[in-house]
Image: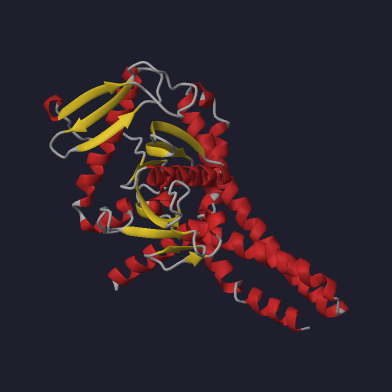
Amino acid sequence: MVELDQFKYVLGTYEKPLVEVGIHFDLANKEQRIQELERKMEEPGFWDKPEESQESMKTLKGLKDDVETYRQLKQKYEDIETLIAMGYEENDASLIPEIQAELDEFIDTYEGIRVKTLLSGEYDKDNAIVTLHAGAGGTESCDWAGMLYRMYTRWAEKKGYQVEVLDYLDGDEAGIKSVTFQVNGENAYGYLKSEKGVHRLVRISPFNAAGKRQTSFVSCDVMPDIEENIDIEIRDEDIRVDTYRSSGAGGQHINKTSSAVRITHLPTNIVVQCQNERSQHMNKDKAMQMLKAKLYLMEQQKNAEKLSDIRGEVSDNGWGSQIRSYVLQPYTMVKDHRTNAETGNAEQVLDGGIDHFINAYLKWLTLGKKKEEE
């Protein structure tokens, strides 16, 4: 059958890449690390240091998940080979839908593992701090910021990541003027660094009585949550600390006292805000941590060799640096202007289905690095 011939050919194209991705995934080293950590956990006193033991458990789980995912992928490859052989032997067309479904699942899993091997940046493993700012356009832009915020939280949910709102400012009529949130999970920054830039929406605005198409913009900034101590000196005279009333959908810990903190770094005009912690003191500590991380990244950016690892790419973050367009009328299309990746299923993208664009970006970024090395 022609379909079986096609399945056999497509599966065969993954035979060598499957072996190669296993090598790049460093499975042997991962299995060795698993054994080392399991031995360490059996040592007396291991549980006496909760923070260290918790970090070891987190690392162990990540390693085991990686190894198990690759083993299942290899098993899936062999199962599909068996199904194709059965189809030939029994000349059974009823197996075609099952083989197609299994092959599609295999390819999706393979691509996910392959992309993970591209996360080699210094901060890729860290949590991510994302800030969305609505551009000019009033209520329409605020609504667009709200749509993007939902898109990222839906994506995080599907990844099993936790989202913590750090700062939130409602739009006057709808949506969000600005929001800063932290995405906690392995490689969160490595994935989300692809989203830094300006996102453009084209649609017939529900807020426009004339029913005309309207274009609106939202800027997205992404930085890693650098947990280790950063050797950055911030003088008291270089910052202005303002307090204000917390507001917005920050969860149960958002209160209405003046506990929210805004810190402005006067020499650079960098502004960071936090309102989600339980006290003004904790909000200030978190805001200072964010400021230190931003200043540290600015220092790192002076080194061109590290720029692409930290910020994703060399680009202007002004309103002209549009990285992606989302067209909802008169047709539906989402297109990334850096990688040319696109899809007509805008609804799926806005429901958190952005892995296609993230994966394309990481491949594009890696290809760019290779060209620079040549």
Q: Quadrant of residue 319?
A: bottom left
Is residue 297 placed above or below 346 in the rendered structure? above
Residue 63: tell me if it is visible.
yes
| 230 displayed left or right of 334 | left
The residue that appears at 52% across and 51% down in the rendered structure is 350
Residue 26: tell me if it is visible.
no
Colour theme: secondary structure
Q: Residue furthest right?
A: 90
Q: Residue furthest front?
A: 210
Q: Nearer the viewer, residue 352 or 2?
A: 352
Q: Nearer the viewer, residue 112 or 265?
A: 265
The residue that appears at 20% across and 35% down in the rendered structure is 232
The residue that appears at 43% across and 47% down in the rendered structure is 144
Which quarter shows the C terminus? bottom left
Q: Position of residue 109 (x, y in %)?
A: 60, 59
Which quarter shows the N terminus? bottom right
Q: Position of residue 294 (x, y in %)?
A: 26, 40
Q: Position of residue 211 (x, y in %)?
A: 46, 54
| 212 displayed left or right of 374 | right
Q: Residue furthest bottom?
A: 2
Q: Position of residue 87 (x, y in %)?
A: 82, 76
